[in-house]
Image (cartoon, grey):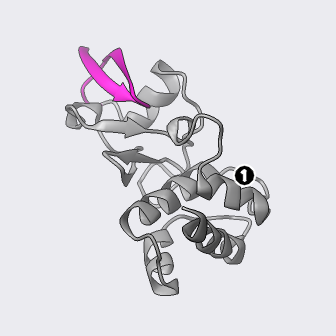
Amino acid sequence: MAIFNLKINNKTQEIDVAPNTPVLWVLRDHANLVGTKFGCGIGQCGACTIHLDGVATRSCLLPVSSIGDRAITTIEGLSEQADHPVQKAWIAHDVAQCGYCQSGQIMNAASLLNQKSAPTDKDIDQAMNGNICRCGTYVRIKAAIKTAAKEA
């Protein structure tokens, strides 16, 4: 075990875990932030997406020892009142069905808009590729991202 001082959602937390513990499990089991979901465990589905210094990152394979002083943002930290433009667009477009993948989808979309304020369809397709939605709401996801881009 080792002690890590992690900056999670703008607050520093002291976490005592094995260095190879995936960030996903640190967030869920030690920081009590359960919005980030376990999906596949191999970094392929996107349910575990967080921001690491603002960049969308899969957390299921990322060892906590690799974080250093980089800032972690989870779905809980994206906005205090759940009023981030992506979150508002998700509601307006009624994107979620089962909802399981949505935190990862939202975090990936928010990261895209941080990098490109007016993404093209190709930009959206490339950025969101690999975020799997079993319910198949991809058309609504793309529409929500376009709406969020106009409001951001």
Q: Is residue 4 visible?
A: yes
Q: Nearer the viewer, residue 15 or 116?
A: 116
Give yes or no for residue 14 being in the magenta stretch.
yes
Q: Is residue 45 visible?
A: no
* Quadrant including the N terminus: top left
Q: Nearer the viewer, residue 70 or 81?
A: 81
Look at the magenta stretch and give its main secondary structure. Answer: strand
Magenta range: 1-20
Give yes or no for residue 93 being in the magenta stretch.
no
Residue 145 lies in what quarter of the image?
bottom right
Residue 34's x, y, as percent?
58, 32
Residue 117 lies in what quarter of the image?
bottom left
Residue 77's x, y, as percent?
51, 36
Report whether 3 appears left or right of 35. left
Q: Element type at marker 1?
A: loop
Tell me what residue is drawn at x 52 percent, y 85 percent: 121
Which residue was labeled with disc 1?
99
Tell me what residue is drawn at x 68 percent, y 50 percent: 100
Tell me what residue is drawn at x 48 percent, y 73 percent: 129
For residue 91, above or below residue 9: below
For residue 77, above or below residue 144: above
Query: What residue type is disc 1 on?
Result: Gly
Residue 10's x, y, as percent?
40, 29
Residue 82's x, y, as percent?
65, 42
* Quadrant including the C terminus: bottom right
Report whether 59 appears left or right of 6. right
